[in-house]
Amino acid sequence: MSVNVDTFGTNTVPETAIMKAVMQVFDLTPKGIINALDLRKPIYSPTSSYGHFGRAPRKNGKGTLFTWERLDRVADLKKAVRGK
């Protein structure tokens, strides 16, 4: 797997620090990605039918839609970038 961080010049910390934080905070193994995004649940049909831009994440009875847009790891990333 290859992961690339490109902030297009908007970064306030070095991209290398962001990349290290991503690697530290996220489990980027196939199993980790499957678990983090709930990929074993059939929740993607509404997304493929109507897209996700402009739609708020919601639960549909099978799981939460748009799991890839959660912001629950922001504090962990900030902490990792600071080296704490």
Image (cartoon, grey):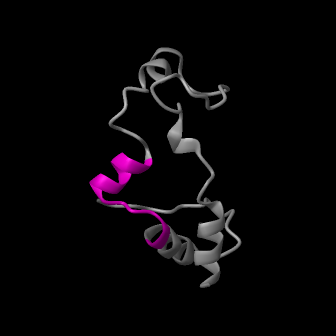
Whether the magenta-drawn stretch holds residue 34 is answered as: yes
- Along the viewing direction, whichever of 73 and 13 lies nearer the viewer: 73
Above or below, 53 relative to 72? above
Above or below, 64 relative to 25? above
Residue at image location 47% in from the left, 15% down from the top: 49
Residue at image location 50% in from the left, 63% down from the top: 5
Q: Position of residue 69 (x, y in %)?
A: 58, 43
Q: In this view, which residue lies farthest toward the front? A: 61
Image quadrant of residue 76?
A: bottom right
Q: Main secondary structure of the magenta part?
A: helix
Q: Position of residue 42 (x, y in %)?
A: 37, 26
Image quarter hosting the C terminus: bottom right
Residue at image location 48% in from the left, 75% down from the top: 20
User: Magenta segment, which residues?
Assistant: 24-36
Residue at image location 65% in from the left, 25% down from the top: 55
Q: Position of residue 13 (x, y in %)?
A: 66, 75
